[in-house]
Image (tube, rainbow, N blue to C red):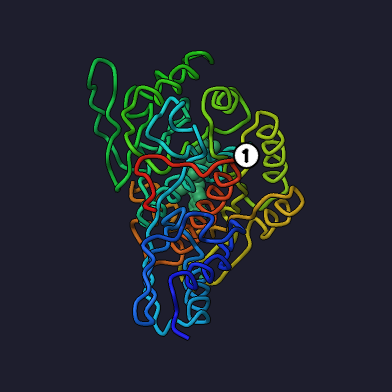
Amino acid sequence: MEITLDGAMAALRKVMDPELHRDLVSLGMVKELTVQGGVASLEVELTTPACPLKDTIAKDVEGALRAAGATRVELRFGARVRAAPGVAQSSLTPGVKNIVLVGAGKGGVGKSTVTINLALSLARAGAKVGVLDADIYGPSLPLLTGVTERPRTVEGNRLDPIEAHGLKLMSIGFLVDPDQAMIWRGPMVTGALLQLLRDVNWGELDYLLLDLPPGTGDVPLTLAQNVKAAGVVLVSTPQDMALADVIRAKLMFDKVGIPVLGIVENMSSFICPHCRGETPIFDHGGARIAAERMGIRFLGEIPLDLAVRQGGDAGVPVVEALPDGPQAKAFIAMAGQVAGAISVQVMKAPRLPVIGSQPRA
Ligand SMILES: Nc1ncnc2c1ncn2[C@@H]1O[C@H](COP(=O)(O)OP(=O)(O)OP(=O)(O)O)[C@@H](O)[C@H]1O
Ligand SMILES: [Mg+2]
Ligand SMILES: [Zn+2]
């Protein structure tokens, strides 16, 4: 029996997105389906270009269409990052589909390192990504990215973000002497942060990542009151001490109504640069257990690796410096998990959101 258009549609209605647990047709992911002489051709529009489940979806689509009589399946992938309904339109950052916070209670666990490498991983997959350094007292982006240029002021007091490494970047460290920001008081800090969100020409972005300062101070609260974040990625090292802080952070984000996307275990094991042997200096696996206990997603582990630290200090993060290395692979896998968790969060919203171009019928 040769495949028909109706038959193909019916078959695709049975293919589930493994992450969103709904079928591809009702999710609006099937585009340009044609059937001719036994050949089924279609585009599947993913909810993120960083989708880690492409291969599973391809296999399931091919299987379903062949079972419905297709002799050949021509499958193309596209991607359109969605925003929760109303988020972008009503926000301080109108072109930004998803604001993603990266934080934890504890200092020095690698929040900034995870943020920049997460940003680069998402951009490599094809997403439009910005990074805002929300650490006003201790900005990290200048060192991490090697940017020394000052942002341009345009249209009065609006600023253009710095475009570098394929990302749009903004940090108080690009604008003022770090010692100057150190003496600011709380309200000036939160004011500066909101200005960096509102008065920067972020343009169209799929993801704007916010690198949070350590601690559970004013910044998360200010953000909760002023932006509708897609969620927060918690970063921890495997030690109990760091994990205790992350549990506190999770409780705080719950209280202020920011969804926790999951937890990353950074400095998970030490990878020896000489023999690539693995040593769990700070122990290993604690974050996965904590995630299970807290009922949140485990987003992956990043090894403690010399190249990660060197990339950070040299202003060329490891995902860019060694894109095929094992360190980059760990970040890219984590980015897929984060992007998936964001999609799940967005799709939980009541309506199928449409920002920018309308989906083709
Ligand atoms: N996986 C890793 N392997 C090796 N070094 C790392 C790793 N992650 C972070 N580092 C290094 O640890 C130091 C602290 O990292 P980072 O600045 O990202 O932490 P942070 O949590 O943002 O700190 P703060 O709380 O001060 O903002 C940096 O020198 C960084 O290069
Ligand atoms: Mg930091
Ligand atoms: Zn060794």
Q: Secondary structure at mark 1?
A: loop
- Say what amino acid the circle numbered 1 marks: Pro
Vertical order, 61 against 309 (above or below): below
Give percent across and percent down for residue 223.
54, 26
Instruction: Quickly name the residue at label 1.
Output: 259
Vertical order, 177 against 72 (above or below): above
Name the residue nearer the viewer: 124 or 97.
Answer: 97
Give percent across and percent down for residue 283.
67, 58
Vertical order, 88 against 77 (above or below): above
Residue at the image position 62 percent from the left and 49 percent from the top? 263
Left or right of residue 268: residue 183: left
Residue at the image position 73 percent from the left and 50 percent from the top? 295
Residue at the image position 34 percent from the left and 56 percent from the top? 320
Q: Locate residue 164: give its quadrant.
A: top left
Give percent across and percent down for residue 225.
57, 22
Residue at the image position 25 percent from the left and 29 percent from the top? 150
Vertical order, 139 against 65 (above or below): above
